[in-house]
Image (cartoon, rainbow, N blue to C red):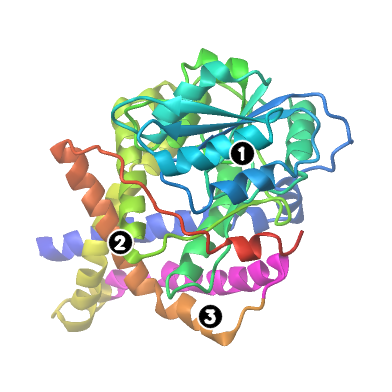
Amino acid sequence: MWIWVLVILVSLILTASAVSTLTWMLHAWGTPENLKATRFSPPDGQHHLSFSLLVPARHEENVLHATVERLLESTHQNYEIIIIVGHDDPDTTAIARQLEAQYATRVSVVVDTNERKNKPKALNTALPHCTGEVVGVFDAEDQVHPLLLEHIDHEFRTTAADVVQGGVQLINFDSSWYSVRNCMEYFFWFRSRLHLQAQKGFIPLGGNTVFVRTEVIREAGGWDENCLAEDCDLGVRLSTAGKKIAVAYDAVLVTREETPHSITALLKQRTRWNQGFLQVLRKGDWRRLPTFGQRALARYTLISPLVQAFSGAVIPVGLAVGLFADVPVGVAFISFLPVIPTLATLAFEVAGLHDFGKQYRVRIGTLHYLRLLAGMPLYNVVLALAAARAVLREYTGRREWELTKHLGVHLKAAHEGD
């Protein structure tokens, strides 16, 4: 009897989790007003703010030059680009110094001499060198639209925001069997989920295309150098401090990136993100959020790696119980409940992929829809393994930074749609 009760309880929890995730995923499409509110408002052509754009680059000789050249196409009048390189990375440093010499009025290089390297340490190394009123963060493989800074400038002034999070989109959807699912994750996260989180007053910021007023980031003490998800941590701390965070997404203006080049790379990337979320959960800054609803949202968001690892383990068991175990009909029915929101999610992902193709003016063929549908089970296994690995690493105290290598496969598509 107690086994039946456990099956019912777990199935109901998984169903509630899947339904809430689906609801948040579709927030932007809930009403025409919601969809309109996710976009940038048209800029007024005035350039009031100055920007310091930080580009941490570690072993990024394949993509750094293209990223900086793209940033230099910005139509904004007042910005500087600060490339951060490691003292032990001569190949990337050589490219950075070449760019500095070629564009001396715009580009400078800061050397991170920390023995143990990670992104937040690199960002903190550059923070004292920032002269702009707003600090922006980009990854070394990013392809940034020339008009983005004008829109960010206008967004700060019209919303009185302390932070503006722009959109990021993986673009090489046809590179591998899993890349289309990876692209859809970003599409729904930046197009919808982050807007809802900002409205609720709790948002784990994205790792790049995030802009913070310089005085605000300095007042916050910069980035947490011991956290593997420094972007999430910063968003939590700023949310807790009551800072206003605006989010905007536009398919034309998104920063374009590439998917991890292999399953191993994807596994390590998601392990790092998940472990970082667990670190932020353990730090407990979110407990100072003013309302119960915000704290509940924070707890649920930050505990997602545990939920994902748990789901990956028990959903197959639940299905097996429903199909093969000798249990009452009601218990068997309840064990199948998580399948319903899962199928609904698949349906909306298919619609989202169609919308993605229209927005980015790329051809979505039958093969891509098949990859999206057929790849879901194995992709979820990878995510569950990454979540479980993150829990294990955090429990055993392994917190070294596992760098994601970038090959630049997205560069060909980066200028399409401009």
Mark 2 → mark 1, Cα distance in angstroms:
32 Å
Q: Tell which tag, 2 or 3, sits nearer the viewer.
A: 2
Task: Indicate the amino acid at tag 3.
Answer: Tyr
Identify the amino acid type marked 1.
Leu
Q: Earlier in the sequence, mark 2 or mark 1?
A: 1
**Which residue is nearer to you in this view: 55 or 313?**
55
Q: Residue 63: say if magenta.
A: no
Give percent across and percent down for residue 248.
Answer: 68, 44
Q: Which mark is residue 369?
A: 3
| x then y, percent, for residue 247 | 64, 40
Q: Which residues are magenta?
A: 333-362
Q: Earlier in the sequence, mark 2 or mark 3?
A: 2
User: Is residue 89 shown above or below 5?
Assistant: above
Mark 2 in CB contact with mark 1 (< 8 angstroms): no
Secondary structure of the residue carrying numbered label 2 = helix
Q: Secondary structure at mark 3?
A: helix
How many residues crowd around disc 1 within 10 Å: few (fewer than 14), some, or many (20 or more)? many
Q: Position of residue 64 (x, y in %)?
A: 54, 47
Question: Any magenta on residue 335?
Answer: yes
Tell me if label 1 and label 3 are in contact, CB under 8 Å: no
Q: Residue under label 1, please give it.
A: 99
Give the residue type that dot 2 points to: Thr
